[in-house]
Image (cartoon, helix red, strand yellow):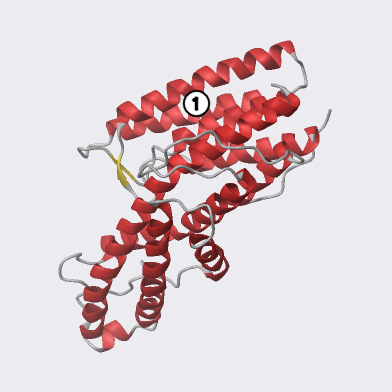
Amino acid sequence: MRFSPSRSLSSSQLSRRSIALAFAGLPLVALAPARASGGAAIGSDLVRVRAKVNAYADLLDLAGQMRTMWQRYTWLVNPDRGPSGNEASINGLHEPRDLSRELAAARAEVSQSPSLAECDPAMAMVIQLHGEVAPLVTEAAAYHASGQHRQDGGAKAREYHARLRKAVPAFLTAYREAQTTLEPVREVVEQAELAAFERRAGRDGRWTIRRTTIEARRVMAVFPRAGGVIELGRLDDAMNAYEAVLGEAETFAAANPQAMIGFERSARNYLAAMRQARTRISTFPAEPKRWAPEIADVETPYQGLLTFADAVLRNLA
């Protein structure tokens, strides 16, 4: 069986597409009672919970650009004093990507059932603060791009800097909090979907692929999207758990040729890339170990795994 090349998709699009393909036609199933962050039990409508999780994840995936932008900016200027006005160029800031669609979708979900005790208010704070910080960053970026900071001796640049120093870190704190509260909810949704598919179709190649990508995402969850401290012990635990699941997938593939169209090789490549990333992080001189895309690019192999999974699932559907 041949599979057609997968077109380029964002991680959130891939996630939605893969779920839709793997679980198409499933009836609504009850989520087993599980405690999300803060102890709120998720309701019984799996499709409704999944829609909320997808909307929140879409926004967080794209809003993470603010962290990288802020990091570049604070490399170029003194974080305490701000720009001097003598810089030839300050290109760390740029107009943030338009997230109006993702913001509107997430905002609509905040008030929708089921209510998620900590996740909903955390996302509401992200939406609020993004609405404050994005226009400020856009304004400051346009000012720097025009070269006015050299004409006024950096006076207005330092005014912008004072405002940015309050607004951006506050947004990134809210962003990390939202990620933390969303993770356990996503865990429950994924396991409920996996169980629903198993009841309907058994543990076939599609179930095995979905289970493997779920475990891969748990490895990715150790890497804070907005930057932060890496817990190497937690990373090791996640990679070991993924390797165990991968071993079962490889056993299944060996016993069922063409059942996953070579997905198991892509999954093995992802593990190799993660182990290389772990080595780079562990040798990074900073203590405690901190994560940033500049330290180890873990997103690319993960996206490659999802792209391949998407292509295989489209051909197995």
Q: Residue at x 50, y 63 (%)?
A: 111
Q: Establish if 160 lies above or below 202.
A: below
Quadrant occupied by the N terminus = top right
Q: Nearer the viewer, residue 61 or 264?
A: 61
Q: Quadrant of the C terminus?
A: top right
Name the spot of residue 78 as percent of width and height, x first.
19, 66
- What residue is shown at x 22% (from left), y 37% (from top)? 285
Labels in figure, total: 1
Location of residue 127 in the rendering, given as x and y in whole percent from the top left corner: 43, 66
Up-down relation of residue 226 to residue 283 (above or below) = below
Give the image quarter of residue 162: bottom left
Residue 257 is situated, as x and y percent measured from the top left of the image, at 77, 16
Q: Is residue 297 visible?
A: no
Secondary structure of the residue carrying tag 1 is helix
- The front one of 245 and 123 is 123
Residue name at image x 64 percent, y 47 percent: 47
> Does 205 appear above or below 45?
above
Q: Which residue is mark 1?
A: 272
Residue kind at label 1, given as amino acid type: Ala
Whether 48 is drawn above or below 302: the answer is below
Please give the name of the residue rendered at 42% of the width and 27% of the height, measured from the top-left corner. 238
Residue 275 can be seen in this image: yes
Q: Residue furthest right?
A: 1
Q: Where residue 28 appears, x then y in whole percent? A: 68, 41
Q: Residue furthest bottom?
A: 152
85 vs 293, nearest the viewer = 293
Outermost left residue: 81
In-image side of 19 versus 131 (left or right): right
Mark 1 neighbour class, 10 Å CA radius: few under 14, some 14 to 19, many 20 or more: few
